[in-house]
Amino acid sequence: MKIALGMILPPLLVIAIALGIHAGVGNYDNGYWINQLTVIGIAIIMAVSLNIVNGFTGQFSIGHAGFLSIGGYFAGAILYYGSIRLFDTPPVAGILSFTLPFERFSEGAAWFTTGDLFFIAVCIGSGLLAAIVGFVVGLPSLRLRGDYLAIVTVGFGEIVRVLIESSNPVVKGRSLSKTPQAIRDANFHDLATGLGEASGFNFIPKYGSLFWVYLFVGLTVLVALRLKYSTHGRAYLSIREDEIAAEAMGIRSTRYKVQAFMIAAFFAGIAGALTASSQGTIFASELAFMKSLEFVVIIVLGGLGSVSGAVIAAIVLTYLPELLQAETFQRYRLIIYSLILILVMILRPRGLLGTRELWDLFRRKKGLAR
Amino acid sequence: MKKPTIAQLQIAGVTKRFGGLTAVDDFSLSIQTGQLHGLIGPNGAGKTTCFNLLTGVYAPDSGSIQLNGKRLNGRRASAITAAGIARTFQNIRLFKDLSVLDNVRVACHLRSRHTLLGALIRSPMHYRDEKQIRLHAMHLLDRFGLAARMDETADNLSYGDQRRLEIARALATDPSILLLDEPAAGMNPNEKSALKGLIQQVLNDFPIAILLIEHDMNVVMDLCQQITVLDYGQIIATGPPEEIQKNEKVIEAYLGAPAHSVEEVVKHDLQQEA
């Protein structure tokens, strides 16, 4: 009974929270909050997943946005080209998604349709593709000890960006009505390379909704926490602490490092799919090295290895620029980021929460009172 | 665990060179369950290199290492641990930021049967493994007098406790051969005598063989049944403690060659000139 509860209750809770946010914010006419919460949710997925590599296994990956790009462009291509080639027109989604905001919430709309199924398959597909790329990138560099991963991931992120920026324009007709026919006529090569050059991939059908974003936020957090409190996660942590000692305890370090890297890439790929499908567009140029660094800053600030710390820092650092008047703040953002990093290094050298979780702090207090 | 009741580690002619330096030269040793074998020698003699060869940190250039007839040289450290050789480190290598309990639980990972997916969906197998791992870890901590400090981070333990935790952690991998690298280093006389009792007790209670590197001659001479002495990477003597204590080569290695008289030196020089 207890086991069944531990197994099923948390996923149900995740679905409930996602539904709650979607119902509370998603179905009113408040585009600003939908947008803000989407951006924050995606930042949480990115931070928590990156934390599995940087915080749990102690390897330093600084090209996480590259996986977001891969997932995003893959999802974009499938949702835009694929939906027309497969279904003739993008399949209609249910209440849980919105293709064009709000109109789906009209009376009598279905909860879950082919569109939703198609979308969720694309999300998982984006994640899997990113994970496979993560395996290819991670295996050679993670076999070595030390900081090789940092160098390789920086290069990886930039390669992804440059490749996408040198792609062809998006395939479309002269007018909106001629577009489906143009896509049907195009060959596979045109579609695979038509990723929108440096100007970004536009026209992606908007399946993404607060429900899907927060469903995956919840899943990412759940996976990270369940990892941390299991023997597999402890194997990751032991590699961070001392790789030689971990090996001497029978932990196959390369295997676990690659595994962690692939899990992180998987969720970053999903974050990419959510970005593309929520905003209807994705820009590789925005997903360069500085973007990757933002996620590193988030997890360093939150405390490497702390899941709740990463969530809190992701919320704060994503919403802060908004709060401080985007226009004026944007110019000094990088300066402020570096200042925050330096200040954290001085005041809290192990981040907001260190390797602990939010609830550990309460437990500690209780222990002291006794 | 389905292990043969008597495990045997056989090392034959193992050699390791670092560039021009032969750190370990033709090292051979055989040890089986129930034995406590000492490995001593002056600083830099190659003792720790021996351990590193046995545990897969380095691969030997030649020779063979066999556990129960299974060849181990050149295999990864984790595979060697899984095969049944566990070790402690000369300079303590605990997982400093993890709790005392988690340090031991990491070493219990080899016991878990469930997959990563099982852990992520919290399968019944996961709960069963976790429960068993926790029981095993607590049992070991209890035995080593560390149970009360299980939630403490390893870094906060006293030096003696850290040494003991390292031994508990190594035992958690269910080894048939345990390698202890200077467990008494930095301990005071009280801690040392307690450690002696502990090692003896471990040898009695667990079905293992212990290979011990130690500089403290009291500890080595009292505990070990057999001692191997290394100097400049070569074995200069093997035998029971009483023999080793009288062995001239050993005394020479530790204290230097006996001084020659002036007469001898002059005679030697004259011979050279002639």
Image: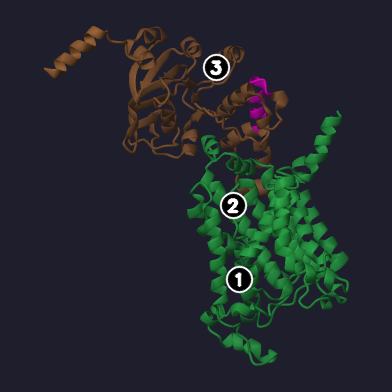
Chain colours: A green, B brown
Q: Is residue A150 magenta?
A: no
Please, which chain is the residue tagged with disc 2 on? A
Residue closest to the eye, B85 or A321:
A321
* Image quadrant in which you'd find residue B272: top left
Q: Position of residue B269 (x, y in %)?
A: 19, 15
Q: Amino acid at mark 3?
A: Ile
Q: Do discs 2 and 3 belong to a common subunit?
A: no
Residue behind mark 1: A74
Q: Earlier in the sequence, mark 1 or mark 2?
A: 2
Looking at the picture, does residue A286 appear above or below residue A216?
A: below
The mark tally for this picture is 3
Residue behind mark 2: A60
Does residue A160 appear to the left or right of A49 in the view shown?
left
Disc 2 + disc 3, Cβ < 8 Å: no
What residue is rendered at 56% in x and 29% in y? B92
At numbered mark 3, what does the secondary structure look like: helix, strand or loop?
A: helix
Residue closest to the eye, A56 or B112:
A56
At numbered mark 2, what does the secondary structure look like: helix, strand or loop?
A: loop
CA gap, disc 2 and disc 3: 40 Å
Residue behind mark 3: B199
Residue closest to the eye, B223 or A127:
B223
From the viewer's perspective, is the residue at label 1 or at label 2 nearer? 2
Q: Which residues are magenta?
A: B132-146
Q: Main secondary structure of the magenta part?
A: helix
Q: Do discs 1 and 2 belong to a common subunit?
A: yes
CA gap, disc 1 and disc 2: 25 Å
Q: Position of residue B119 (x, y in %)?
A: 65, 46
